[in-house]
Image (spheres, helix red, strand yellow):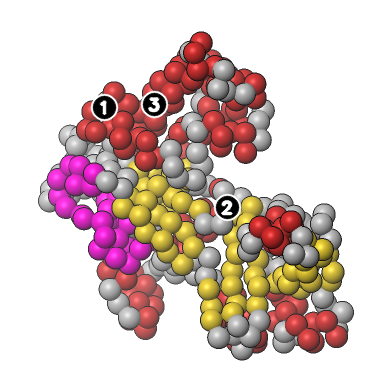
Amino acid sequence: MSFKCGIVGLPNVGKSTLFNALTNSSKAQAANFPFCTIDPNVGVVPVPDVRLNNLAKISKSKKIINTTISFVDIAGLVKGASKGEGLGNKFLSHIREVDSIIHMIRCFDSDDIQNVNPTVDPVRDLEIIETEMMLADLESIQKRLEKNNKKNVDEEQLKILKLALDSINDGKDLSILKSEFDKKQLNQSGLLSLKPKIFVCNVDEKSVQKGNNYTKIFIDKYGQENTLIISADIENQINELDPKEKNNYMEMIGISETGLNLLIQKGYKILELDTYFTSGPEETRAWTIQKNCTAPKAAGEIHTDFEKGFIRAETISYDDFIANDGWVNSKTNGKMRLEGKDYVVKDGDVLNFRFNT
């Protein structure tokens, strides 16, 4: 599976610049005027994982295949988007299609880059976006609860929608529903306000290490757990350098990881994802799965026939695979296990599936 992150925010906060940096492309037009982006740009990016190279070296693999992440550059939203302002309804529909939301927040001053508001205020800007998504959810809920539409909604979803409506009317955060329903049920509701969120504070170069007053105000309110401080301009500069120059530049400005790596790590955490590997002479490949995924479900990521005909999984942990120099020695040294249908795959497992067709 590949997961899709939508980059949202007010106009001119740096969404397209970040998208170009993350995807190392110039697909997304970046310009100094509102609504520069109208149709969403989509970039599919390989997920960096040093473990792949280590496994491939031992297995003498001909190919290395990374798992992927998709970034979607969604046009800038404005106050009134839920009522169609700034082509808002179209933009909000694009958000429904992503697995998680990257909120791009302006945390820098600039006389050269227009701001749709008279001041820089990251808390206010986020509240504008969140409010518009909540209002869009309210309209969606009300339509689906209308008498003529109720027959198309199952009982579980009706319960979610009614509780969501009550929460909105009472001014409560919809995240309270997460304590009553599982993630799959909530995902089926299609409510924007329930999508996992990452907050990216876009700063200038001098603030990339320690942040600034704007990021402090934002973190004081929303916390650090899902917040990243990134300079979209710096990420663009980094991507224009060769690997050696890139490392030297990052060391000079005092950052140890790229924004892409930070976002992927945060994305895997909030979406509760793990990675397992297959490795042999033909290819070494990474596969993305949900945490607590059983072996048959993991096999199904390769092909549905693998899940249907699952017998067992030959399993070695990544550390054991490396320490024992591959499949043969791992098996000889008792580090390979045969796991059945109830086995919960762990992050870093190296698997070989046995199945009937």
Instruction: Note whether residue 248 is visible.
Output: no
**Which stretch appears magenta?**
14-38
Out of 119 and 269, give the one closest to the viewer: 269
- Displayed quadrant of residue 82: top left
**Disc 3: CA contacts within 10 A as few (<14), some (14-19) or many (>=20):** many
Q: Which residue is at 27% across, 69% downward?
A: 237
Q: Is residue 33 left or right of residue 95?
A: left
Which residue is rendered at x = 65% and y = 66% of the image? 276
319 falls in the magenta region: no
The circle on residue 136 is: 3
The outermost residue toward the top is 147
Q: Which residue is mark 1?
A: 84
Determine whether, in the image, residue 243 is placed left or right of residue 31.
Answer: right
Residue indicated by mark 2: 269
Which quarter of the rendering shows the C terminus? Answer: bottom right
At x 70%, y 72%, the residue is: 350
SS state under label 2: helix
The residue type indicated by label 3 comes to Ala
Q: Could you tell me the amino acid type at mark 2?
A: Lys
In this rendered view, identify the residue nearer to me: 150 or 14: 150
Q: Nearer the viewer, residue 284 or 192?
A: 284
Which of discs 2 and 3 lies nearer the camera? The answer is 3
